[in-house]
Amino acid sequence: MKQEITRFAPSPTGHLHLGGARTALFSWLFAQKNKGKFLLRFEDTDKDRSKKEYEESIISSLTWLGIKPDEDPVFQSKNIELHRKMALSLLESGKAYSCDCSPEQLNQMREKQLAQKMQPRYDGLNRDKNLPHKDGNVIRFKMPIQGKTSFEDKILGTISVDNKELDDLVILRSDGSPTYHFCNVIDDEFQNVTHIIRGEDHLPNTPKQIQIVNALGYEGFEYVHLPLVLGEDRKRLSKRHAATDLMSYRQEGYLPEALLNMLAKLGWSNTTEDIFDLEKLVEIFEVQDIQKAGAVFDIERLNFVNQAHIANMKI
Ligand code: GLU
């Protein structure tokens, strides 16, 4: 049987936040449970926002929690030549096309669609023109127009979208840089990932990425989309509710065991036990016990768990 490989793929544009830490924890637990591998990839292609200091702080926060990748991290920016090569190969095989629409043309297209109460998208103007690719043009992916894209999410069940909802997205920009959806798929293949475990905010990306997987002739991945982490008002957790980055809790003196314990219970449960350590968690964790509904972060609970772990410390 193929070894199960998961990955955590943060963009190093900030410190590790609670949602990210929970994603990393569940991916790591899944790999531990299945005697697989857990990998780390920095999606660092946004040059302006990606920072070395954030890479270091994400690694340091994961280490503090006890979540160790099984291999050295991969940096997306180092794979750009591969991404470019794959975009050109799709162009060659007719699965992508060159497009010279100007920003003004795209704007007009958008406004016209909005006026007709349509979802703005590329209308396919250059799709069948077979324009020769030259500097300054973008490469767009030729999404199928008919049929549906369906997949089984391990938590959410069958997800299905009409292909006509999917945009002919740009895979290579006019400056030759590859775009996020495209790099993400190629890097997952490059790292031999089998299971993509990530936040539910990425769910709308998945059908587009599955079409890219198909066009590139990859075998494909299993998907697990985790419920969002919410504040007490059931809106997405933000700084309005509580500190969102792990660093703050670390600096305030919370124990890593308490954070892990709390993160594990954010959207997952198969135990009435409140206090457990990482070893116990590996033993009892099952991906099918992850819930569908958003998970509310509760600082009172974290404080309670932290106190219990302090009381359990062997002095
Ligand atoms: N880089 C993405 C993020 O930080 C993760 C993408 C993924 O897990 O596929 O949200």
Image (cartoon, rainbow, N blue to C red):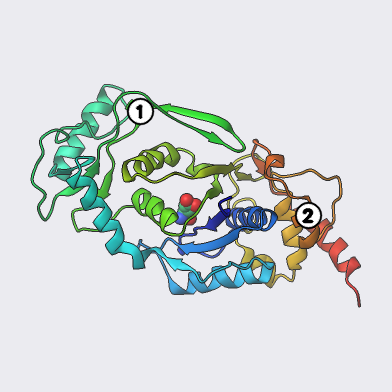
**Picture coordinates of residue 3 (x, y %)?**
57, 55
Which corner quadrant of the image does residue 20 belong to? bottom right
- Residue 99's tag is none
Which corner quadrant of the image does residue 206 belong to? top left
Between 50 and 271, the residue placed more toward the observer is 271
- Residue 163's tag is 1
Q: Can residue 48 be seen at all in this image of the molecule?
A: no
Considering every residue shown, the one lying at the far front of the view is 1
**Picture coordinates of residue 254 (x, y %)?**
75, 67
* Up/down of 152 relative to 4, above or below: above
Distance from mark 1 CB to nearest ligand 1 atom below 8 Å: no
* Up/down of 89 relative to 121, above or below: below
Q: Quadrant of the C terminus?
A: bottom right
Residue at coordinates 49% horizontally, 59% vertically from top-left? 10
* Up/down of 274 relative to 12, above or below: above
Residue at coordinates 65% horizontally, 36% vertically from top-left? 293
Judge from the rendering whether residue 45 lies leftward or rightward of residue 285; answer left or right. Answer: left
Considering every residue shown, the one lying at the far top of the view is 116
**Circle 2 crowding by C-alpha within 10 Å: few under 14, some 14–19, many from 20:** few
For numbered disc 1, what is the local secondary structure?
helix
**Picture coordinates of residue 239 (x, y %)?**
58, 54
Q: Can residue 101 be seen at all in this image of the molecule?
A: yes
**Picture coordinates of residue 31 (x, y %)?**
63, 56
- Residue 283's tag is 2
Tell me the CA gap for discs 1 and 2: 41 Å
Q: Amino acid at mark 2?
A: Glu
For numbered disc 2, what is the local secondary structure?
helix
Judge from the rendering whether residue 195 lies leftward or rightward of residue 258; answer left or right. Answer: left
Between 296 and 165, the residue placed more toward the observer is 165
Q: Amino acid at mark 1?
A: Asn
Residue at coordinates 43% horizontally, 44% vertically from top-left? 219
